[in-house]
Amino acid sequence: MPGAKFHSERHQVQRIGWLRAAVLGANDGIVSTASLIVGVAAAASSKGEILLAGVAGLVAGAMSMAAGEYVSVSSQADTEAADLARESAELASDPEFEHRELAAIYRKRGLDEETADKVAKQLMAHDPLAAHARDELSITHITTARPIQAALTSAATFTTGASLPLVGAWLSPVGQPMIVTVSAASLLFLAMLGAIGAQTGNAPVLKATLRVAFWGAAAMAATAGIGMLVGTAV
């Protein structure tokens, strides 16, 4: 329509790639480092040993998160590339079959036979590989794998998350006060993380907050119990 105005929409699903890696990294950083600190502190170690264990956990965790995200997302990217290469070859060898295949997909989605055939023909005339990638393989610019982005996001957010309980441990005296301070502060940070992640993704805030805080508390309780048992045995 002449003179029609279009507005740009930003849907929350566009954030799914980096948001997933960011929330996972920060959550893992807080939980793993806080649990490590609480467990070592419960074993009645010195403050230097506790902080050293926390820093070692931060460095190892950040590297592990980056490597793990890069490897896993690279595997996804390799699979996507292989599927696209195969689809490109099929389009070159038998375009008519690929046209019928695409039209059948649109018929299953509710279009009548004539409309589905026209849509498939027009989309394949414009960019056949993109049409099949989107509608047959479910590969789009939103869901496509980005290994480097995932790795850097996870490493950075893990480091940020792990730094929070480390600061709490550094400011607290050794023993029960440190355990209480680190646990309480970490649960607060986890609740904030859950709320921020839910808000960013436009999801229910309370549900996300309680879920993150619950599992964080469970992890810290488990490691504190192990630390107390080890400390008593030693």
Image: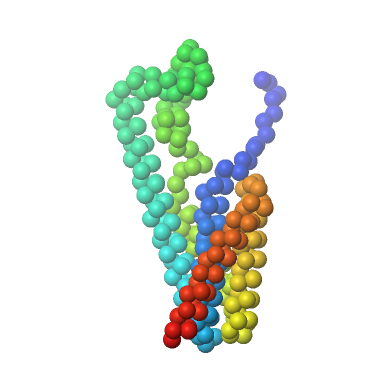
Which residue: 64% across, 37% down? 9
Applied colour scheme = rainbow
Q: Position of residue 105 (x, y in %)?
A: 44, 23
Q: Is residue 234 left or right of residue 158?
A: left
The answer to which quarter of the image holds residue 162 is bottom right
Q: Position of residue 14 (x, y in %)?
A: 57, 43
The image shows residue 128, relative to residue 192, as above or below, that is above
The image shows residue 206, relative to residue 103, as above or below, that is below
Q: Is residue 59 left or right of residue 206?
A: left
Residue 104, can we see it?
yes
Which residue: 70% across, 24% down? 3
Report the front residue among 51 and 136.
51
Which residue: 57% across, 75% down? 166
Q: Is residue 55 left or right of residue 167?
A: left
Report the front residue among 35 and 222.
222
Report the front residue among 198 and 136.
198
The outermost residue toward the top is: 114
Work out which quarter of the rendered image holds the C terminus and state it.
bottom left
Q: Position of residue 186 (x, y in %)?
A: 61, 69
Which residue: 45% across, 37% down? 139
Residue 54, can we see it?
no
Q: Position of residue 155 (x, y in %)?
A: 49, 63
Work out which quarter of the rendered image holds the N terminus and state it.
top right
